[in-house]
Image: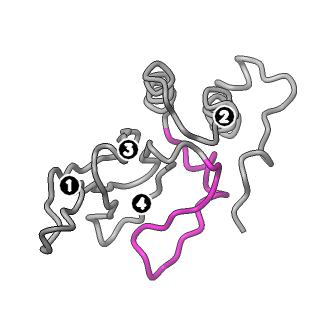
Amino acid sequence: MPLAVNDLSPPAAVTLKSVVQSPQARFQRLIHDIQAKLGSNDGIVSSNAVRLKLESLLQDYRSDEEAWQGFAFRDPSQAFTRNLVDKGNGNYNLILKGTLTETRYAWPDTTKPGPMQVTQSITFNRDQVTYMADTLGLHKISNPDPKEYAVSLH
């Protein structure tokens, strides 16, 4: 069963030395900082400044499997699964392992039935960040590599 990030509150006194030395402390610090930035707004980011700060936090993090492996529950029948670490903001995707392709689609025109229109397709690698919001359309995340399992913080 996935753990909510609230179960992973950082130690009472996290020193710079412990953050630098411990992958778990760095990961917990990232989750803590994300929560602090989001506050009590249930993951809805309305401020551009908050959005940019969240993106910066994610871009500064360097993935270490030892830190997050306890949250990644692999389903051997899938090339990519989504596991809960935190309710998060739902808009960002930090690639922790492997490669993921994000395909974006225009909002469907309900007056004109037909296939969804691809607006963009980008492949992201480990430690890269992607941003998606309803105003940008719809999207799909997929793993283009059938041999390597992918993990992301979404």
Would you say the residues marked 2 and 4 are in contact, meaning their CB atoms lie under 8 Å apart?
no
Please name the residue that numbered disc 2 is placed on.
35
Q: Residue at x 32, y 46 (%)?
A: 125
Sequence-first tag of 3 and 2: 2
Please name the residue that numbered disc 3 is placed on.
133
> Label 1, label 4: how many angstroms apart (C-alpha)?
26 Å
> Label 1, label 3: how many angstroms apart (C-alpha)?
12 Å
- Is disc 3 placed on a helix, strand or loop? loop
Q: Residue at x 45, y 24 (%)?
A: 56
Would you say the residues marked 1 and 2 are in contact, meaning their CB atoms lie under 8 Å apart?
no
Give me the disc on residue 55: none
Q: Residue at x 68, y 40 (%)?
A: 24
- Front label number (3 vs 4): 3
Sequence-first tag of 2 and 4: 2
Which amino acid type is marked by label 3?
Ala
The answer to if 6 sits in the magenta stretch is no
- Label 2: few (<14), some (14–19) or many (≥20) C-alpha neighbours in 10 Å: many
